[in-house]
Amino acid sequence: MDTSCLNFGRIKGMDNVQKLTELFKEFPGIGPRQAKRFVYFLLTRNTGFSSDLSKLIAEVRREINVCDSCFRFFPQNVAHSKSCTVCRDASREANTLMLVSHDVDFENIEKTHSYSGYYFILGGSIPILEKNPEKRIRQNELFEIIKKRKILGLSEIIVALNYNPEGEHTLSYLQSLLRPLAESLGIKISTLGRGLSTGTELEYSDTDTIKNALKNRQ
């Protein structure tokens, strides 16, 4: 789970263009040059564009809730429930629980229509040199969900992470973390098959690749 935030003490003394650049640098995959381009793009737009953007950001924060079961984001106007539509769907297979890093990974797998179990969003991945891995993912919440899902018939946990160094490190950590609990509850831990090539991120994987990785999971 990513707990990073902008340190305004660090940017004290910067002008607003520099401060906004620092904000954009917090976005995934955005470097200094791209961040600066975003700032100057906004400056070229009319005031209505900037006003609409800021309004939408505020509204998204108000309208989106976090599922109390899988922890993915979902519109909170859905039956005013604390659980998302997937977690409330009793027709899904209760014997499998798939662990993914982010909501975009969930969305990409779900659109393949090749998996019909439940999910858990870890909220991030663990960098190789991370000293406090427990702060990067929802591991305490994961333990609780596994125990609850076991009562409902859970028999397999599928760890579906990016096939890159950070994803492999997170996988190793999760396997070590979950093995005692899984063995005590009689739950199998599997991983995606090598339909995913080295360096692949689930967010950008095509449908057939994900289907093969699920089919050939180990």
Image (tube, helix red, strand yellow):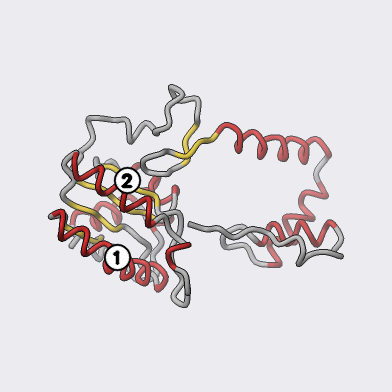
Amino acid bearing label 2? Tyr
- Left or right for 124, reference 44: left
Classify 10 Å Cα crowding around label 1: few (below 14), some (14-19), many (20 and above).
few
The CA distance from mark 1 to mark 2 is 18 Å
- Left or right for 62, reference 108: right
| Dot 2: element | strand
Label disc, if present, on residue 13 of the rendered structure: none
- Left or right for 203, reference 210: right
Could you tell me which residue is drawn at 67 percent across and 62 percent down?
25
Q: Would you say the residues marked 1 and 2 are in contact, meaning their CB atoms lie under 8 Å apart?
A: no
Of residue 124 and residue 7, the one placed in the foreground of this image is 7
Q: Position of residue 17 (x, y in %)?
A: 82, 58
Q: Position of residue 216 (x, y in %)?
A: 18, 59
Name the mark nearer the viewer: 1 or 2.
1
Residue reaching furthest to the top: 79
Q: Position of residue 192 (x, y in %)?
A: 25, 60
Could you tell me which residue is drawn at 41 percent across and 61 percent down?
201
Could you tell me which residue is drawn at 45 percent across and 58 percent down?
124
Could you tell me which residue is drawn at 35 percent across and 48 percent down?
120
Number of residue marks: 2
Classify 10 Å Cα crowding around label 2: few (below 14), some (14-19), many (20 and above).
many
* Residue topped by disc 2: 119
Quarter of the picture holding the C terminus:
bottom left
* Residue topped by disc 1: 177
- Picture layout, residue 168 above or below residue 2: below
| Dot 1: element | helix
Q: Position of residue 75 (x, y in %)?
A: 50, 31
The picture quadrant where one finds residue 110 is top left
Of residue 161 and residue 137, the one placed in the foreground of this image is 137
- Left or right for 145, reference 42: left
Of residue 52 and residue 5, the one placed in the foreground of this image is 5
Amino acid bearing label 1? Leu
